[in-house]
Amino acid sequence: MADMLIVEIQVLFFAKARELCGQKESHLLIPSTVSYNDLVDQIVKTFSLESIQHNLILAINEEYATTGSIVQLKEGDKVAVIPPLSGGI
Amino acid sequence: MLAMMLQPLQALQQIAIRCIRLCCHVVERYICVFIIVMDVVDLLKDEILNLRKKLMEKEAVLRQHQTQMYEKAEEKGLYKKLTNVEIDRYSRQIIMPEIGMKGQQALKNSSVLVVGAGGLGCPSALYLTGAGVGHIGIVDYDKVKLNNLHRQLLHPETSTGQPKVLSAFNSLKRLNSFVHITPYDMQLDSTNALDAIRDYDVVVDATDNVATRYLLNDACVLTDRPLVSGSALQLEGQLTVYNYNNGPCYRCLFPVPPPPETVTNCGDGGVLGAVPGVIGVLQALETLKILLGHQGVVTKKLLLFDASDCSFRNVRLRDRNPSCAICGNEPSITALVDYEQFCGSKANDKHNSIHLLDNVDRISTGTYHDVRSEPHILIDVRSPLEFEICHLPGSLNVPLKDLASEQLVQPLKEVITKKGSSDKDFPVFVVCRRGNDSQKGVLALRETLSGLNVSVKDIIGGLHSWAKDIDPSFPVY
């Protein structure tokens, strides 16, 4: 039942993700063992990031999270949502 | 008796008339002085402009002579060695163990292509030129605009309207005549990118649009060049080096381009000048480290800069993706493609007009000007911040995103009900900055105002057209 443990993670938003959800960071309750895809889905759904869901990378505690992997999360882990900053200058 | 009473009044009247005459005289004199001062200002401006022209001509002649001198030295095989003047000039970095004579010589014999002479390209090229990189190419198709100047600091006021690469060339040459600068006044695309990049050791991505980012990525993979990528918007910046030391390329991280409507440009999102300044200088720094063969280049890492709290975060990235479409083990892309088609957006950050409405649902600024005195409502759908910059008198500010909300549109409905009559559709006009959001506004209002007797139309070309065609004193941003 260890994988049913629910943890609270900190979600950090950058670039367009920050603009879309209107905040720099927030919190999310999520199972401690979760697939990369489910983690993205959950974040996208909770923070209304549907328009950029295929154009972002996730970094867990400043480490790149690989697509298709199984992710282990602890209470207080920081998950950064990073779309490319492509326009601008 | 009456005459006696009127006497002081007449005296007062006389004094008042004298005062008014005196005031008129002062105003007249003030206007005269103002006109004289204006004439002097205009004369000085003209004189300075002419002097600048002469100065630039002299500098061009000097450069020609210097180039000839360098070419002669190069023919003799002396070019690769540092001259005494160069040793003195770069001594403050030569003296560092990380650089030394070898490093400075390596920089002199290196070449960098900076793509974009804007907010990132300017600071980047500035520091590469200062450091003594032998050959710097700089690409841009655009001309200098007044609203570029707060962040694109290679361009002086007098360059407004000139090609950016020409302005950058002049500024860089003035800074360091030892560096060979090649300006490319052109749009980089699939037909010319590989040839341009092959002449250089490192490429700096200082561009402002997604299509050119994918183009540069693919071109650098195909020519095996490191790509020093930077971006900045509002108060945020990103920096990483692609295609270097088994690190990822842009496609390894972002195989799918973002939907065009999710990409914000500086014209719409804004940018604080010092933010691209920070990222551009860091791009120059990483480029120098690559040229010098230093460790610690920001590859397989992404630097996230947040100016709001001055935080720098380094996120570890993946290695090269073996199944990447361009840099993978079995690439499916082996030549440059059409990047505007791939991204569904133009390879620039310019505004594109959309056409959501039929012509009958739109009016020109001229027609609106004619009906402005008749009863109507004008809704300005820009953000409150933009509304604060300028707006037409009497317009109501309801931002586009609020138009779908029943609650936020309720006060508007009440105004229409109060002003309108039952036998005729009450005119509602929608305006925005350039005429795209106003069309979206009309579509949204048709939903939220359904059931009311209204005719909703948008103003073609928005406030930009108003300033251009009706009121030249209206601010443009």
Image (cartoon, rainbow, N blue to C red):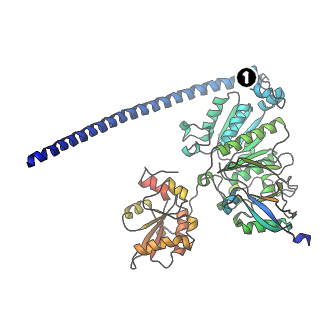
Q: Is residue A20 left or right of residue B410?
A: right
Question: Looking at the rendering, which quadrant does residue B339 occupy?
Answer: bottom right
Amino acid type of disc 1?
Answer: Lys
The residue lying toward the viewer, choosing from B124 and B215, is B124
Q: Which residue is mark 1?
A: B72
Residue displayed at 71% across by 35% down? B127
Say if B262 sits above or below B293 in the image: below
Say if B67 sits above or below A64 in the image: above
Coordinates of residue B291 in the picture (x, y in percent):
80, 36
Coordinates of residue B170 in the picture (x, y in percent):
62, 33
Q: Around disc 1, counting alpha carbons within 10 Å, would you say few (fewer than 14), some (14 to 19), or many (20 or more)?
A: few
Coordinates of residue A84 in the picture (x, y in percent):
73, 55
Q: Is residue B84 visible?
A: yes
Q: Is residue B188 left or right of residue B399?
A: right
Parent chain of label 1:
B
Farthest top residue in view: B84
Farthest right residue in view: A1
